[in-house]
Amino acid sequence: MPVPTPAQLGPLAALAGTWEGTKGMDVSFHNEDGVVGDTPYREKVTLSPFGPVDNGSQQLFGLDYRMAAWRGDEEDPFHTEIGYWLWDAARGEIYRCIMVPRAAVVIAGGKVSADSTSFTLTSTLGSTTYGVLENPYLAEKSSTTKFEITIATGADSWSYDETTTVNVERLGGELAHTDRNELHRVSE
């Protein structure tokens, strides 16, 4: 299958490749300690172009992605994700489909122009388009009610700032779980 051109990938073209970041910061509820705390992390993200994918008259181009994050020098990642970033040029929309191995899925999206170098995607619990699904345990103990990510791209780097709003039973309310990092290209 031919690799999509940058024009076909729209604003996602800047994200294609393999990236690493060493200045990640995760602010979340630490279940073992029962407190909110900071976790510095490093990560690797691979985004591989594909497409087109045709849904009737809708045509999508995208990036298959895999992400892993490690604390310090740990060998095993504390967080992984797989999914897709998709560009719908006709609608001017980006969709990010995220799966994490906690039996949770997020589809976030937003309106974006083809030449954007920054954009924000959102998702809310209960939405049938940009929504959150989670297993029954998470729904009871640590339910995601909203997800928002802002991406900014540069020549050989990109950054993100994301907030996952979580209703944490042990805290008796909502917590803004945040993650941010700047990633640098290590290969095309």
Image (cartoon, helix red, strand yellow):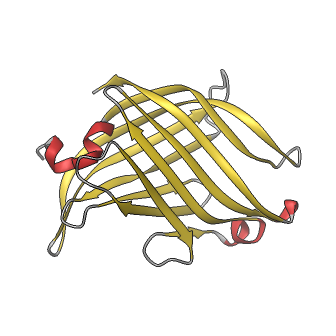
Q: Relative to residue 155, is residue 169 depicted above or below?
A: below
Residue located farthest toward the left when viewing the structure as drawn: 2
Q: Relative to residue 82, is residue 184 depicted above or below?
A: above
Q: Quadrant of the C terminus?
A: top left
The residue lying toward the viewer, choosing from 138 and 88, is 88
In the image, residue 87 lies at what x, y percent? 27, 56
Residue 177 visible here: yes
**63 horizontally vs 20: left or right:** left
The quarter of the picture where residue 59 lies is bottom left
Q: Residue at x 66, y 20 (%)?
A: 73
The residue lying toward the viewer, choosing from 64 and 40, is 40
Residue 4 visible here: no
Q: Residue at x 51, y 27 (%)?
A: 21
Task: Tell me how many marks there are.
Answer: 0
The quarter of the picture where residue 88 lies is bottom left
Q: Relative to residue 41, is residue 186 depicted above or below?
A: above
In the image, residue 10 lies at what x, y percent? 22, 49
Q: Residue at x 50, y 51 (%)?
A: 149
**108 horizontally vs 148: left or right:** left
In the image, residue 34 lies at what x, y percent? 88, 49
The residue lying toward the viewer, choosing from 61 and 155, is 155
In the image, residue 66 lies at what x, y percent? 43, 42
